[in-house]
Image (cartoon, grey):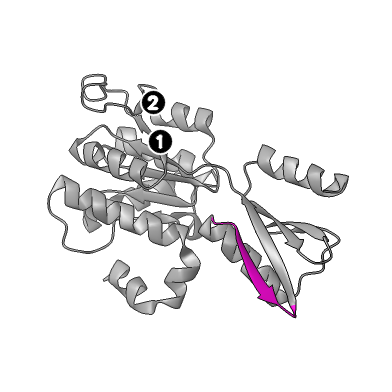
Amino acid sequence: MKRAILDALLEARGKKLPAALATDLKSGSQALVTLSAVTGGLDLNRAELANVRSAIRDDRSQTFDANARRIFAQVFNPPLRMVVVGAVHIAQSLAPIASLAGYAVMVVDPRRAFATGERFPNVEITHDWPDDALMRLVPDRRTAVVTLTHDPKIDDPALEAALRSDAFYIGALGSTRTHAKRLARLKESGFDDADLGRIHGPAGLSIGAKSPAEIAIAIMAQVTGVLHAKELAAKSSVKELGRA
């Protein structure tokens, strides 16, 4: 690996940017690919670049054939994280489901009576206020933030902090009416329509979920769909299901 590529890789990892090292298996030429830039001497055409970035989004290193050559894309993605705001019943189901899906989960709730180790075994818990917690955690492009309390005093500061971050998914639980009021408050705080469009509310795919466990599944399904946005775009039926 040439020094320029190594420096680019270290910079990407330092900034927690998803990246892949693309290598021509015949010539040995390499390029460091992120979702917005390419560094190195390997000249990738549009289709090859799309394949490398698809590997990044899939979080899976892979080899593909193109133009009579083989390209190996070695993925260097930061770990997936999920910040769950609100130590409520749904969070008790969501935390283990997200962990099984590969997320490092943190539950944020200043209410110490709810956020306890007994209710959330093997889950990192913080009793900081959500804005302070998110400022410390610095959500990146591999972080999902989900608010569950329905309490504006807790959810709104978390959403404001999440909207100022690079979090790939921001979800807020609550009815359509509750969400409309929430958006109005956030708009008064200075966020525009593009910002507010990042919030999935009510959080979760519309699958008729009723119980806390079912709602957690619906949320996790939506988070997964957003993470793999390319696949969702190609499968309109899934997209329609999510917004039905």
Q: Nearer the viewer, mark 2 or mark 1?
A: 2
Q: Residues within 10 Å of mark 2 (few under 14, many from 20)?
A: some
The answer to which of marks 2 and 1 sits earlier in the sequence is 2
Q: Position of residue 214 (x, y in %)?
A: 18, 52
Q: CA distance from mark 2 to mark 1?
A: 8 Å
Determine the residue located farthest toward the front in the rendered image.
26
Closest to the observer: 187 or 29? 29
Q: Residue at (74%, 40%) from the top-left corner?
A: 10
Could you tell me if the residues under marks 2 and 1 are in contact, i.e. CB atoms within 8 Å?
yes
Residue 61 lies in the magenta-colored region: yes
Residue, disc 2: 129
Q: In screen coordinates, is 129 left or right of 52?
A: left
Label 1: element kind? helix
Residue 220 badge: none
**SS of the residue at dot 2?**
loop
Disc 1: which residue: 157
- Give me the residue at 32% from left, 52% from top: 220
Q: Which residues are magenta?
A: 60-68
Image vertical order of residue 91 relative to residue 120, above or below? below
Residue 228 percent across, percent down from the top left: 46, 62
Q: Quadrant of residue 244?
A: bottom left
Report the side of 119 relative to 108 (left or right).
Answer: left
Residue 131, image quadrant = top left
In this view, 157 is above or below 114: below
Tell me residue 240's x, y (percent). 32, 74
Q: Nearer the viewer, residue 126 or 38?
A: 38
Question: Can residue 203 be seen from the camera position used here?
Answer: no
The amino acid beneath tag 2 is Trp
